[in-house]
Image (cartoon, coloured by chain):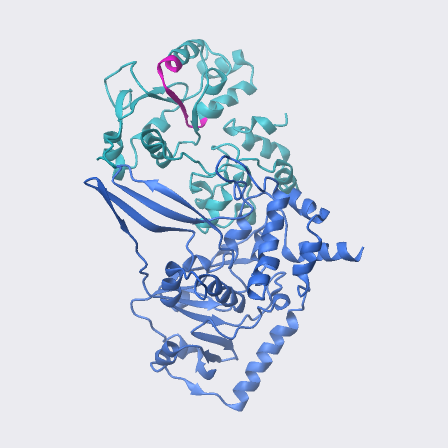
Chain colours: A blue, B cyan
Amino acid sequence: MLFKTIKKQDFFDFYFPDFQCIGPKKVGTNNNGKPIYQFLPFSSFDEIDLDYETTEYSAKTYFLPYKETLSSFSFEDNDWTQEINYSSNPRLIIGLHPCDINGLVKLDKVFEKTLFPNPYYITRRQNTFVVGIDCKQPCDRGFCSSVGSNTVTHGFDLFLTDIGDRYFVKIGSDRAFNALQKIKTRDITKNDNELYLQARNKFDDGVEKTVRVENLPNLLDIEFESDVWGKWGDKCLSCGTCAMVCPTCYCYGVTEHISMDFNKSDKIKQLYSCNLNDFAQVAGGHNFRPEPATRLKYRYYHQHRGFVESFGQPLCVGCNRCGRACLAGINPTDVISDLQREQKR
Amino acid sequence: MKYLGIEPQKPKIAVFDFTSCEGCELQLLNKEETLADFLNAVEIVSFREASSSSSDNYDIALIEGAVSRNDEVKRLEKIRKNAKVLVALGSCACFGGVNRLKNEFDLKSANKEVYGNDPKETINVRPVKDIVPVDIEIPGCPVSKAEVESLICHVVWDSPFQPPVYPVCVECKQRFTTCLFEKGQMCLGPITRAGCNAPCPAGGQGCWGCRGPAVEPNYDSFFAIVKEKGFADIELREKLNFFGAFQEVIIS
């Protein structure tokens, strides 16, 4: 890895003409006066705040939109043509925390480095210049360190760590190296290295491992019929909020939409959630997972068992966005701890 | 246009208003970008707001409004006989709507309150399905025109007509709306059927449930959450009662 440092004010000279720029913007405050941030388009760096604690939503939608048209069919003269559009405009996303970049690295495994690569995802991913930044403080009940997502080694173009009046910068791609030629950078010194490690250590000391997940795939198999699922399932509103705010949930449904002039039809993909009532409903109306508890259970099975079996790591990055967004107060550390207590009984 | 040699049938449509504000009917004439195509896809034989023609020969009857007079009962029964498909259009037709609030009061005093010394004939407000069988319901205050268009495609092409089974929360998330509970407001979004694209929460107003319950809403959990967040029972009850869509759980 190539490291440089950049003076903070010089970094904001960073200029991407013709790029749509996305960053953490403050959109308001909650009931307790706590600021709420979202990844939104900006036109000037003073609109964003890189010291943000966390965002309400992940940046997933910029890579896997909530809704996208997979293809369009046009009918003419007793025949039809299909149109598929993979193109995406260049984009800069700045301020992704390690959890979010780890989330992208996991999505890469599913959509890019796989037997059936997904061109829609790949185009967006490759046309997005990702600038990450280390967290300054742990977020509310985040458990990134428990699932190994508190540090990031790849999956970004640039990665920043705040070391006072400068950013300690990791360069993760050729294009990032080239982009940096246009602004003032400095080679790292021994002092920079120390400041970087201090900043990292300070953060790591603040995030204890709150939940052990090493043996979770096996535990989940053993606890398939545990009462714990009923306990949390009874609370679940089946509203899909957890999957919508999650940086890695990627399940979806596809529907056809006929235009009103009957000359065109769009095949539209919509991100779905395994907690929604008809997620496992099939033709003929049979629902394989009619109870909220079963649906909730399978969300945990995908995140912490199925994905581990396929890729050797959980799908969950420990950001706890689902836990904070859940009105019913269902959060992963509580559910997992409950299962583990079940074992000790 | 023809598709695979098949010429689409133009369904004959009639629109009828009962006790309502006629806003859903106006919706039928909204969404200008596809209005010409919409009017081309159907044959409107009766629609007081849009056309002076009137006929009893129709395939689809779109019923707007609830029933609140005896003559409306008879009129509705006649329409049912004529229509191949009867659609309840909007929250009033589906649930009774805002008009249903009248049922909470003594009819005589409600009549006096509104009409003074010139009382009108009135009965308790009832949704369309309480009088005649309804084939399809499109709830909403007002209805979404996109959903009406989807219904037309369904009738013409037999494509599925599938309103979302999930609650409004999904649509709030899809448009980056901050949860109104987070801002200290009550919102019926978690128990209300999506399909409206959640415009009210996006505008800072909690959902009042005009589209009625989502499929199998978790009332117990939702009511516990509302209570825990400190909202009064009366506030919850007023919201649930507003469009008359949650009669199955109203605690009096």
Q: Is residue B119 visible?
A: no
Instruction: State the residue at coordinates (36%, 42%).
Output: A256
Magenta part of the chain: B79-91
* Magenta stretch holds residue B160: no
Residue placed furthest toward the bottom: A190
Question: Which residue ends up furthest to the left in the rendered image?
Answer: A77
Quadrant of the rendered structure where residue A198 is? bottom right
Residue B242, image x, y percentages: 51, 29
Q: Position of residue A227 (x, y in %)?
A: 72, 46
Residue A319 screen position, x and y as percent: 57, 61
> Residue A176: x percent and y percent?
39, 77
Quadrant (top left/top right/bottom left/bottom right) for the N terminus of chain B: top left
Q: Is residue A63 left or right of residue B223?
A: left
A23 over B180 or under it: above or below: below
Extreme residue toward the right, this view = A345
Please tell me how many numbered marks the rendered image carries. 0
Q: Is residue A284 above or below residue A44?
A: above
Q: Is residue B83 magenta?
A: yes
Q: Residue at x 62, y 68 (%)?
A: A145
Locate residue B142: give its quadrant: top left
Residue at 58 percent across and 52 percent down: it is: A299
Looking at the figure, which quarter contains the C terminus of chain B?
A: top right
Left or right: where does residue B228 sit relative to residue B130? right
Left or right side of B217 for B154 = left
Residue A325 in view here: yes
Query: Depth check: A240 or B26 in front?
Result: A240
Along the line of sight, the residue nearer the viewer: A191 or A180 = A180
